[in-house]
Amino acid sequence: AVLTLTALAAFEAVAVMPAAALQLGAARASARRIGTILDEPDPVTEPAVPRPRPSGPVHVRMSGVQVRYEPDGPLALDGLDLDLSAGRRVALIGPSGAGKSTAAAVLLRFRDPAGGAVTLNGADLASYAADDVRTVIGGCPQDPHIFDATVRDNLRLGRPGASGDELTAVAARTRLLPWIDSLPKSWDTPVGAHGAAMSGGERQRLALARALLADPAVLVLDEPTAHLDPETRAALTADLLTLTAGRATLLITHEMEGLDQIDEIVVLDHGKVTERGTHAELMRAGGRYRQLQDGPSFWPG
């Protein structure tokens, strides 16, 4: 009996080894990917002595900005001019691959331009620490990350020191509060990995609430209504236009809804500006923008 039980116990000791071997292989692959990322040069250069972070109203200007992802590669942006001042809303529209998200990456200091200039209150954007820039210029990415945590913890990422009243106020502004109140544990409800327990519209509204809670001087919204059904997209677009009134905002989108309420519309294609102006001016010009306004509600491609 002792010999039999000893043999069984020995098998129990080695039974987990195949699973451990699989985990070891996955860990090695992950380590190689991390090593490759760490070996890559930093896409932005931090200043040796950064300027103090600006306070109060800010003015961001892009002049003739060019961006390349490879030293000898094609230009992802070629001569982009943008002017973002307090209360001014600009829409950057165009097909996928036009360079819209590249412009956001430059403003948020995730990518340095290869040519042209980007200034914040008249000073080179690269003369500020990247973290300070992202405090002044912030926003909502195209695919916001939702952590496997509670609703409260996910929202508080926008401003860790926010009070309960501040969380409630921003949730009400973004129309999240009725959904939160309907949850079994309200603010303490886990949302699951990548927000699995939330709908697409709820994830986007949570990301928007997070951005508003951070309260940047310039708000960059990168495809905030992507992957939503038409009804949810229309409702969120209407709320975005209300919430961004009076705030410097760059709206990056391929949707055509609500653009008549934007101060300036810039049409990009293959990194170049093909049209720009107000909704009324572009409609009178009769170009591609006019064709799409009279046809589909989104920019194809």
Image (cartoon, rainbow, N blue to C red):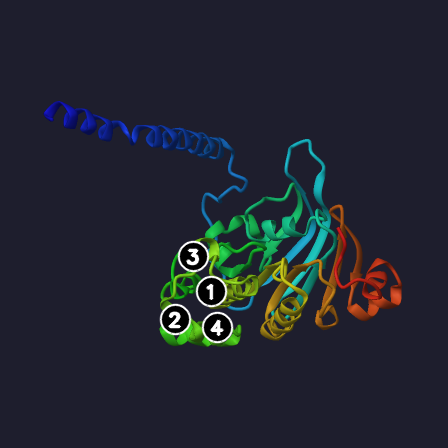
Decide if residue 130 is in sight here: yes
Residue at (62% x, 68% y) in the render:
232
- Residue 238 shows which numbered tag? none
Q: Residues within 10 Å of mark 1 (few under 14, many from 20)?
A: many
Q: Is residue 247 left or right of residue 253?
A: left
Q: Amino acid at mark 3?
A: Gly
Quadrant location of the N terminus? top left
Res. 76 image quadrant: top right
Amino acid found under the numbered disc labelled 4: Trp
- Give the left or right position of residue 54, taking residue 266 as reference: left
Classify 10 Å Cα crowding around label 3: few (below 14), some (14-19), many (20 and above).
some
The answer to whether the residues at label 3 and label 4 have Cβ atoms under 8 Å apart is no
Q: From the viewer's perspective, is the residue at label 2 or at label 1 nearer?
A: 2
Q: Which residue is mark 4?
A: 179
What separation in Å lies between label 2 and label 4 (alpha carbons)?
A: 10 Å
- Out of 100 and 188, give the one closest to the viewer: 188
Q: Which mark is residue 214?
A: 1
From the top left corner, tell me how far across and down residue 83 is, in percent: 67, 61
Residue receiving disc 2 = 184
